Image (tube, grey):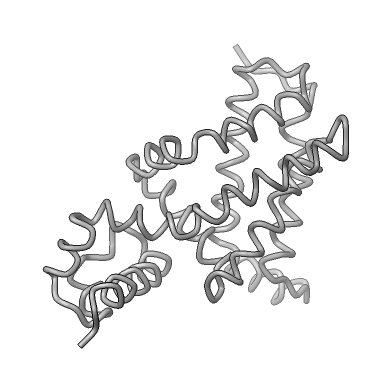
């Protein structure tokens, strides 16, 4: 018989796979318990609700990624007085790739989960991330702002959210996009290649000085 710790891990593992594959809304607790081979009471005991289970699944990644990303950013700032936006966004690459050491296909799974959270309007996840990892987000935004001091803060707010939308869509669809690129252009991509492709695009979009909002 599995002990409580093993049962909790089985639930998290099953939920992670199903959430990434099917999405949060389309994955029921009964489907998770069936996959994990545990009873529904176990989910309620360890997590209390589906929302808490979703947060726990993401926390396994965020607890590792957020501090690592901040450390990489700080190191870049120490070595370069005025880091470019491309440099700042690039500090996220290795912390993302290191998630493969945390979990099998960890980078892809984490980005899929993050994408699911925003695409499916899981508002509680936004609250969870800003509440528990706010200091890391604040430091990253400050670095971006320092890199493009000519961009008004309100404009930077919009551009960073446009960036997030671009990244979420691209990463949520990365496997399908890679398949299309392979079939139509003979180009072979893995998750690292896709991440490196999107960085110059978003960096250019955020830093573009000639964009003016229509009124």
Q: Is residue 33 left or right of residue 127?
A: left
Compared to residue 210, the image places residue 55 above or below, namely below
Q: Quadrant for the N terminus, please.
A: bottom left
Coordinates of residue 176 in the picture (x, y in percent): 58, 68
Coordinates of residue 201 in the picture (x, y in percent): 75, 44
Compared to residue 117, the image places residue 33 above or below, namely below
Compared to residue 27, the image places residue 128 above or below, namely above
Q: Residue at x 73, y 35 (%)?
A: 205
Q: Which quadrant of the view contains residue 179? A: bottom right
Coordinates of residue 21 in the picture (x, y in percent): 41, 69
Tell me how many marks there are.
0
Instruction: Pick whichever, 186 or 103, lies toward us.
Output: 103
Q: Which quadrant of the view contains residue 79? A: top right
Coordinates of residue 8 in the picture (x, y in percent): 28, 70
Residue situated furthest left in the rendering: 41
Residue situated furthest top in the rendering: 215
Q: Quadrant for the C terminus, please.
A: top right
Q: Residue at x 78, y 27 (%)?
A: 147
Q: Is residue 189 left or right of residue 13?
A: right
Q: Is residue 27 left or right of residue 162?
A: left
Instruction: Pick whichever, 6 or 187, lies toward us.
Output: 6
Q: Residue at x 54, y 58 (%)?
A: 111
Q: Which quadrant of the view contains residue 60? A: bottom left
Q: Residue at x 37, y 64 (%)?
A: 19
Residue situated furthest bottom in the rendering: 1
């Amino acid at each position: 018989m599995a002990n409580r710790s093993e049962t909790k891990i089985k639930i998290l593992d099953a939920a992670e796979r199903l959430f990434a594959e099917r999405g949060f809304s389309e994955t029921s607790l009964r489907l998770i318990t069936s996959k994990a081979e545990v009873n529904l009471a176990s989910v309620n005991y360890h997590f209390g609700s589906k929302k808490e289970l979703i947060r726990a699944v993401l926390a396994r990644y965020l607890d590792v990624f957020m501090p690592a990303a901040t450390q990489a950013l700080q190191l870049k700032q120490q070595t370069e007085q005025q880091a470019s936006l491309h440099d700042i966004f690039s500090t996220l690459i290795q912390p993302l790739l290191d998630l493969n050491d945390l979990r099998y296909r960890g980078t892809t799974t984490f980005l899929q989960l993050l994408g699911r959270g925003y695409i499916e309007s899981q508002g509680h996840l936004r609250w969870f991330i800003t509440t528990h990892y706010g200091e890391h987000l604040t430091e990253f935004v400050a670095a971006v702002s320092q890199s493009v001091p000519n961009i008004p803060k309100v404009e930077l707010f919009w551009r960073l959210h446009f960036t997030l939308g671009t990244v979420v869509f691209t990463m949520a669809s990365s496997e399908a996009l890679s398949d299309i690129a392979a079939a139509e252009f003979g180009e072979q991509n893995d998750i690292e290649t896709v991440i490196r492709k999107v960085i110059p695009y978003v960096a250019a979009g955020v830093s573009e000085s000639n964009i003016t909002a229509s009124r």
